[in-house]
Image (tube, coloured by chain):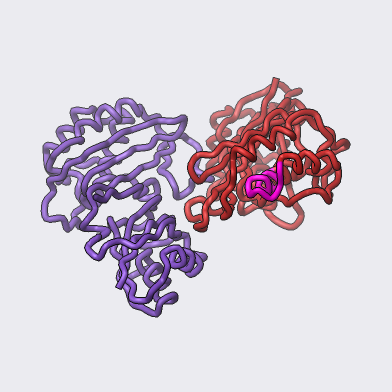
Chain colours: A purple, B red
Amino acid sequence: MTRFALTLEFDGAPYMGLQRQPHGPSIQQHVEEAVHAITGEQVTLHAAGRTDAGVHALAMRAHVDIEKAIDPFRLMEALNAKLRPEPIAVLGCAIVPDDWHARFSCLGRSYIYRITNRRAPLTLERGKAWQVSAPLDAAAMHHAAQHLVGHHDFTTFRSVHCQAASAVKTLDRLDVVRDGDGIDIHAAARSFLHHQVRSMVGCLVLVGRGKWSGEDLKAALEAKDREALGFNAPPDGLYFAGAVYP
Amino acid sequence: MTRFALTLEFDGAPYMGLQRQPHGPSIQQHVEEAVHAITGEQVTLHAAGRTDAGVHALAMRAHVDIEKAIDPFRLMEALNAKLRPEPIAVLGCAIVPDDWHARFSCLGRSYIYRITNRRAPLTLERGKAWQVSAPLDAAAMHHAAQHLVGHHDFTTFRSVHCQAASAVKTLDRLDVVRDGDGIDIHAAARSFLHHQVRSMVGCLVLVGRGKWSGEDLKAALEAKDREALGFNAPPDGLYFAGAVYP
């Protein structure tokens, strides 16, 4: 048995999420089926993070265990050939030790959330960003975001479907950067709660529109109450950007 | 009659091109139909440049003449509402003098051609860039590109369907810039021949792969012969980026 670490890029729009779902296609299903087509083996794809329907990845890390002897470069090329025409690509493939685990060895995860702040509907970025028509004050959003950085109980920003044992997490980074009409929100932590990034982004947009102050965001965090939440940003703008390993 | 200058962004993938075509949908047709739905008027859209099937625009400039009194902001909002769900957006709308002409007043046009230089197929950028698997030497491409800058007979880089009276043009800029896997080629001139950017990019990729030297590119230009051409880059990576007016 050889363990292969994969780096996956995908457009999340056509899928119910990364992980297998009974009610629709997933990235996991397509990658597992591609491995089966190449090796004849039934494998399980383990990924650094789960992603919701419509959420994208620039560099999701994952692993599979394969019995058949195969060169990593050849495996990557074969996976990319089998995955066509699905918008899922294997950007990297390497042999890792048997105790390396895409999920459990992961020390840090990062996401980027992309907003396009303009009145005109999206064309080239359709499904790839969240169009917000009202003018956003990105500097105010960045300033307010710093209230969320650090060790906190993120219950307010947690989906009711979240399965994490604890809502206490350490958020390492939450930066809001404007470039023209584009606003990128960079989030990094060891791990995130279900819907945490989209919930935080939803609240930051309330700040950007002037509906919430930074103090309102701080109060929402401290309320530790899902009812204190503004709203969830849509999945279109969310990208799993990277995972860190020892 | 009032002349309105429009700034259009579009995803060219679903269209036969900007200009009306007998055999399929065009950006011109959709914009003209949207104006008709708003004003009841049959107008003609005049654009700074023609674009081929599959070619995109970040900021195409165009104009229409409208009899009905309408505020430019309201016209822009109404056009964007009527254009849905087509991937065509009006980013700007302003009243201009009657002698301002999107095509004939235009003093300069710029394009960006996007290459993604990697072995893995495209996912998020599918239809939005040209994937080139072989490693490209972007510095060599940029160096060779400078042979094309200036006042030349561009017959070599001209489509057999080109309707321009003369193949002599002045290319103001042809820059090749790498950022990770992405290579952007920036081209600017007063005007371009049909297929000129895609032809130049095709030849630059031959240089980037080491199949052509800079001298080969110079010789192809000086041959003034369509047969000397390497090949045309696909439309997916081409974006009309901007137009300059007095």
- Picture quadrant of residue B114: top right
- Can residue B30 be seen at all in this image of the molecule? no
Magenta residues? B201-213
Measured from the top left, where is residue A55 in percent x and y?
Answer: 36, 53
Give the quadrant of the C terminus of chain B: top right
Position of B63 with respect to B181 (left or right) is right
- Can residue A75 be seen at all in this image of the molecule? yes
Q: How many marks?
A: 0
- A25 or A202, which is in the foreground? A25
Measured from the top left, where is residue A225 in percent x and y?
Answer: 13, 44
Q: Residue furthest right?
A: B165
Q: Residue furthest bottom?
A: A40
- B154 or A24, which is in the foreground? B154
For the point 54% across and 39% down, the residue is: B178
Quick check: A25 above or below A209? below
Position of A188 with respect to B34 (left or right) is left
For the point 21% across and 42% down, the residue is: A229
Measured from the top left, where is residue A52 in percent x and y?
Answer: 32, 56
Quick check: B206 above or below A14? above
- Picture quadrant of residue B102: top right
- A140 or B192, which is in the foreground? B192
Give the quadrant of the N terminus of chain B: top right
Measured from the top left, where is residue A98 in percent x and y?
Answer: 25, 65
- Picture quadrant of residue B163: top right
Position of B78 with respect to B60 (left or right) is left
Characterize the magenta stretch by its predominant secondary structure.
Answer: helix
- B170 falls in the magenta region: no
Quick check: A214 above or below A199? above
- B207 falls in the magenta region: yes
